[in-house]
């Protein structure tokens, strides 16, 4: 305390001057409309910036919670949207191949990506949802930008997902403009591109053409984006195109995904398996 009093005594002249300057500024602001307006404008700007900085810092540290809430909301919205769209009764002739068939039995569960690989030949990611959340092997996984892959293995609270960057994963695909069915399989070269297989050379292709899921299996609904045709060619004696597809997902930046549950999956597989056995 004594040192503080000594310090004040040493700077008494400066402190007195500072006090009177503050009084003068206060009188000037209070009695002069122009200076008063300028003061309050400046103080509001400064305080506003302080509040904004504090809010930005607070939001930054709350981003994981906010992202998870948004992910859960998106999963619920996807499910509600798919269930609200029912088949339309067609009363006139219609080209069935152009008709948008929408499965409304699918359910969506959001999950956070906690581990991810993109540099291997068989890439996978790990998510924070497992058997306790109803996750099972061979469930489809998508993101807001399109298809991701399918569930490979499941524990009580986690699951691993084989992504499209895995050359063991084949996905039934569909060229929207060309009305052509095909398959997608990664060749292990470029993590931003994949290959489209078995497209006959007589099909008229265009760069930028949209590639989506066909819905020909019980894992993915149809019309989920896979990517866009980047380049195509064929050798003189080839029956099929060599097609490069730019993937809609950048797998190195995935943070949240959606697991697709199909309540009718087992029934469909059982029926198709019985038909296969009868034909053998």
Image (cartoon, helix red, strand yellow):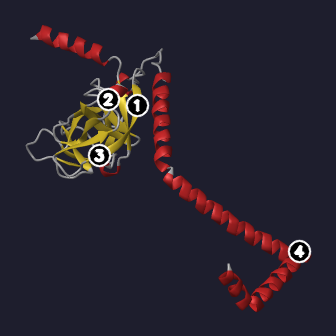
- The residue under label 3 is 115
Residue 147 at what x, y percent from top left?
Answer: 33, 38
Along the polypeptide, which appears first: circle 1 or circle 2? 1
The residue positioned 56% from the left and 58% from the top of the image is 56
- Mark 3–mark 1 distance (CA, rounded to whole Å): 18 Å
The residue positioned 64% from the left and 65% from the top of the image is 49
- Judged left or right of residue 232, residue 51 is right
Along the polypeptide, which appears first: circle 3 or circle 2? 3
Instruction: Check disc 2 and report its element: helix, strand or loop.
Output: loop
Residue 172 at what x, y percent from top left?
Answer: 25, 31
Instruction: Check disc 4 and report its element: helix, strand or loop.
Output: helix
The numbered dot on residue 30 is 4
- Mark 1–mark 2 distance (CA, rounded to whole Å): 14 Å
Compared to residue 16, the image places residue 192 above or below, namely above
Which label sits in the foreground, 4 or 1?
A: 4
CB contact under 8 Å: marks 4 and 1: no
- Mark 4–mark 1 distance (CA, rounded to whole Å): 61 Å
Which label sits in the foreground, 3 or 2?
A: 3
- Judged left or right of residue 28, residue 261 is left
Compared to residue 277, the image places residue 245 above or below, namely below
The residue positioned 46% from the left and 41% from the top of the image is 68
The numbered dot on residue 109 is 1
- Mark 3–mark 2 distance (CA, rounded to whole Å): 23 Å
Which quarter shows the N terminus?
bottom right
- The residue under label 2 is 220
Along the polypeptide, which appears first: circle 2 or circle 4? 4
CB contact under 8 Å: marks 4 and 3: no
CB contact under 8 Å: marks 2 and 4: no
Which label sits in the foreground, 1 or 2?
A: 1
CB contact under 8 Å: marks 3 and 2: no
């Amino acid at each position: 305390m004594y040192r503080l009093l000594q310090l004040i005594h040493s700077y008494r002249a400066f402190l007195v001057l500072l006090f009177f300057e503050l009084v003068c500024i206060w009188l000037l602001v209070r009695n002069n409309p122009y200076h008063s307006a300028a003061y309050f404008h400046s103080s509001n700007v400064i305080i506003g910036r302080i509040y904004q900085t504090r809010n930005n810092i607070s939001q930054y540290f709350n981003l994981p919670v906010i992202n998870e809430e948004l992910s859960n909301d998106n999963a619920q919205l996807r499910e509600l949207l798919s269930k609200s769209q029912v088949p339309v009764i067609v009363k006139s002739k219609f080209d069935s191949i152009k008709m948008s068939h929408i499965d409304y039995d699918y359910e969506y569960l959001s999950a956070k990506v906690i581990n991810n690989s993109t540099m291997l030949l068989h890439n996978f990611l790990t998510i924070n949802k497992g058997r306790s959340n109803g996750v099972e092997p061979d469930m489809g996984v998508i993101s807001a930008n399109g298809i991701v892959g399918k569930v490979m293995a499941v524990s009580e609270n986690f699951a691993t997902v084989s992504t499209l960057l895995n050359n063991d994963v084949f996905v039934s695909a569909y060229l929207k403009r060309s009305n052509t069915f095909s398959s997608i399989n990664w060749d292990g070269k470029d993590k931003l591109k994949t290959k489209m297989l078995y497209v006959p050379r007589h099909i008229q292709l265009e760069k930028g053409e949209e590639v989506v899921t066909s819905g020909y299996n019980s894992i993915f609904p149809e019309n989920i984006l896979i990517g866009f045709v980047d380049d195509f060619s064929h050798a003189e004696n080839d029956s099929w195109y060599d097609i490069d597809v730019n993937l809609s997902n950048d797998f190195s930046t995935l943070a949240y995904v959606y697991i697709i549950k199909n309540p009718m999956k087992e029934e469909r597989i059982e029926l198709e398996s019985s038909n296969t056995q009868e034909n053998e």
